Amino acid sequence: MNILENNFDPIESLIFEHKLRIIGVNFYQELDLMLIVLNNRKVLKRNISQVSQLLANAQKEQLNEFDLLGGGVAIHWPKLDEDLSLKGFLQDELISLEAL
């Protein structure tokens, strides 16, 4: 077995082999909207309330206090103890495309 061989699923391969990363996150609470900006110039749009009840109930200051982990493969809100991954966002994107 090749030790360099990876066991990534297709989404993980997209993230790691193509160096896909989150570079920004913006919130519009009044619209229940979260925008996730990727380094390939794509923007993922999510309803805050569907992503996380912790985020949906957070104050604006709490929402904006996050860290990008692993160079942008996840988002962490230390004061809320909440983590969301790029993989999860991309899985949701694929599910919504399949529903069309």
Image: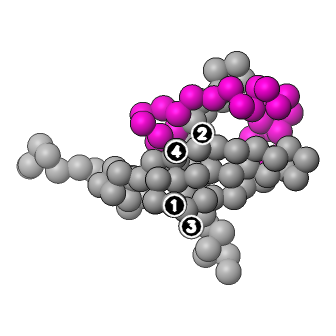
> Is residue 54 found inside the magenta-colored segment of the image?
yes
Residue 13 shows up from this direction = no
- From the image, state whether disc 2 or disc 4 is nearer to you: 4
**Residue 94 shows which numbered tag?**
3
Badge 2 crowding class, 10 Å Cα cut-off, few under 14, some 14 to 19, many 20 or more, is some
In the image, farthest residue toward the left: 1
Q: Amino acid at mark 3?
A: Leu
Give the SS element for disc 2.
strand
Residue carrying label 4: 23
Mark 3 or mark 4: whose residue is earlier in sequence: 4
Which residues fall within the magenta stretch? Answer: 48-74
| Residue depicted at 70% across the width and 19% down the height | 79
In the image, farthest residue toward the right: 30
Viewed as shown, does residue 90 lie left or right of 78? left
Q: Amino acid at mark 2?
A: Leu
- The picture places residue 69, in percent across and down from the top left corner, at 48, 32
> Is residue 39 found inside the magenta-colored segment of the image?
no
Residue carrying label 2: 84
Number of dots carrying numbers: 4
